Image (cartoon, rainbow, N blue to C red):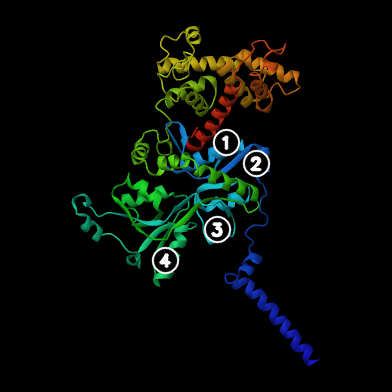
């Protein structure tokens, strides 16, 4: 055998075996090999600004948070939620909240198209920038150490308290800090250990825990130390005075939202929106509302109607559940309607004379036998009976959700006006059994002379934007209620 050919064959065989062995045993050492053995994402979902506007809905991925997104006394609130609402309004689209189970799932959800934007206080990091595009930062903060003050701290001097606390990160060497894995806090701990040339042990927490959960466990003594963004830690200190948040553990960090790399137009629009918003007083008002107003923050967390904690929307939950069964609706939907009518204020009275939780007009209340419209039991029972009457009028609507929308529109503006909108829809060859994008459009047109003077219209002018927005607002609120409250 030719010696050169023999050696060459052996080299090829050895090279081949080495390559196979490297793919199996060395995959942790090469980014390229990791991609070959276990690709992270084969194809990123592509859906940019024009697609969002065509769909008419902006989908925002977020998590529960008493500062970012929550339900309080029946009203959806939160720093990120309010900024998003202004953005959706600016884009002339609806806002849909997509809840992530934990922080680990945020980027995977974005990349597969569950939502269009990650809308939480997301720290810009080099690793994250490899997979997503960040907006311009809307907040600058730093990480701080959260720790519990010594027992009996109220009776101690500030110097004595400080002497028993960690005041320099060097003192964390050989101790343990609790953080979630896929967070900037975890990365900061790794970097800090490297900077100090020694070990800080990491207690990895479940991804579904929120910053607020972790702070609570520190206050209760279940956990010893954690890293949390300073603006979040500070507002929670007003509720938990037994914690200390004075020791910084990082330099300044930028907080932003994130979109897919395949959404450049959405990114440009978000940046323009944030720049415009920060030029107005609105931004500072919203920021102070959630991160500086300590009294309101404590009131929310102490409230029986901080829904994330208590599962309650208002003190009328039981009453609404009882009456919702009469009409066969999800009680949370009826609850959303009642909030729209009165914000759960039993003594509420409109300029037109409508009163009570369900804003009954005097003539309607009289017809339904209501003696005292401010009495919650009487008002809700009568209101639901009237709503059921409207619902029964529309028994020709085959789709139950559409039928509910016709009933709500009739409750709000009167059955006759809805019938007029339906007649116009028929005249212009639209689907008369669909409220959405059909009859609702002609309800809007009934505020224009060329439509309310049409021969087919019997009841004339109506402020069509009121029932139109009424239904959108109720169903948006209903979707939010479903996020927070079980059926």
Looking at the image, residue 81 sits to the left or right of residue 21; the answer is left
**Marks 2/4: CA distance?**
41 Å
The percent position of residue 50, horizontal first and vertical second, equals 68, 42
Neighbour tally class for label 1: few under 14, some 14-19, many 20 plus, Cα within 10 Å: few
Badge 2 is on which residue?
52
Give SS at disc 4: helix
**Marks 1/4: CA distance?**
42 Å
Q: Earlier in the sequence, mark 1 or mark 4?
A: 1
Badge 4 is on which residue?
192
Give SS at disc 1: helix
**Marks 2/1: CA distance?**
13 Å
174 lies above or below 483: below
**How many discs mark residues in the rendered view?**
4
Give SS at disc 2: helix
Nearer the observer, disc 1 or disc 3? 1
Q: Which residue is painted at 46% across and 13% down in the image? A: 353
């Amino acid at each position: 055998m030719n010696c050169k050919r023999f050696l060459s064959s052996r080299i090829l065989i050895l090279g081949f075996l080495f390559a196979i062995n490297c793919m199996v045993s060395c995959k942790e050492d090469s980014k390229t090999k990791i991609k070959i053995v276990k690709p992270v994402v084969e194809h990123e979902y592509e859906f940019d600004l024009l697609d969002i506007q065509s769909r008419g809905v902006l989908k925002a991925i977020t998590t529960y948070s008493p500062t970012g997104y929550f339900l309080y006394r029946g009203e959806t609130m939160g720093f990120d939620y309010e900024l998003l609402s202004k953005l959706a309004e600016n884009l002339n689209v609806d806002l849909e909240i997509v809840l992530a189970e934990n922080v680990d799932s945020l980027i995977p959800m974005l990349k597969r198209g569950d939502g269009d934007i990650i809308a939480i206080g997301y720290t810009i990091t080099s690793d994250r920038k490899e997979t997503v595009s960040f907006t311009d930062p809307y907040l600058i903060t730093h990480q701080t150490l959260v720790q519990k003050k010594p027992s009996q701290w109220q009776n101690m001097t500030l110097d004595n308290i400080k002497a028993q606390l960690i005041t320099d990160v060097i003192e964390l060497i050989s101790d343990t800090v609790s953080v979630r894995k896929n967070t900037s806090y975890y990365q900061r701990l790794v970097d800090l250990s490297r900077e100090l040339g020694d070990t800080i042990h990491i207690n990895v927490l479940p991804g579904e825990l929120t910053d607020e959960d972790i702070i609570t466990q520190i206050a209760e003594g279940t956990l010893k130390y954690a890293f949390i963004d300073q603006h979040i830690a500070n507002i929670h200190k007003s509720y938990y005075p037994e914690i200390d948040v004075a020791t910084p553990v990082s330099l300044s960090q930028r907080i932003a939202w994130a979109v897919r790399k395949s959404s450049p137009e959405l990114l440009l629009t978000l940046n323009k929106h944030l720049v415009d918003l920060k030029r107005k007083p609105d931004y500072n008002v919203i920021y102070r509302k959630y991160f500086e107003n300590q009294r309101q923050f404590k009131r929310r967390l102490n409230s029986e109607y901080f829904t994330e904690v208590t599962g309650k929307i208002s003190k009328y939950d039981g009453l609404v559940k009882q009456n919702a069964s009469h009409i066969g609706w999800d009680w949370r939907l009826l609850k959303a309607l009642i909030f729209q009518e009165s914000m759960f204020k039993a003594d509420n009275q409109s300029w037109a004379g409508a009163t009570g939780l369900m804003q009954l007009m005097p003539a309607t209340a009289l017809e339904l036998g209501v003696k005292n419209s401010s009495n919650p039991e009487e008002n809700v029972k009568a209101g639901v009976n009237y709503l059921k009457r409207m619902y029964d009028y529309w028994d020709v609507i085959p789709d139950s959700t559409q039928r509910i929308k016709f009933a709500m529109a009739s409750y709000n503006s009167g059955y006759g006006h809805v019938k007029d909108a339906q007649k116009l829809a028929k005249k212009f060859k639209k689907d008369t059994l669909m409220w959405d994008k059909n009859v609702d459009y002609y309800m809007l047109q009934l505020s224009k002379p060329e439509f309310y003077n049409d021969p087919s219209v019997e009841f004339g002018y109506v402020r069509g934007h009121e029932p139109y927005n009424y239904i959108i607002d109720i169903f948006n609120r209903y979707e939010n209620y479903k996020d927070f409250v079980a059926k």
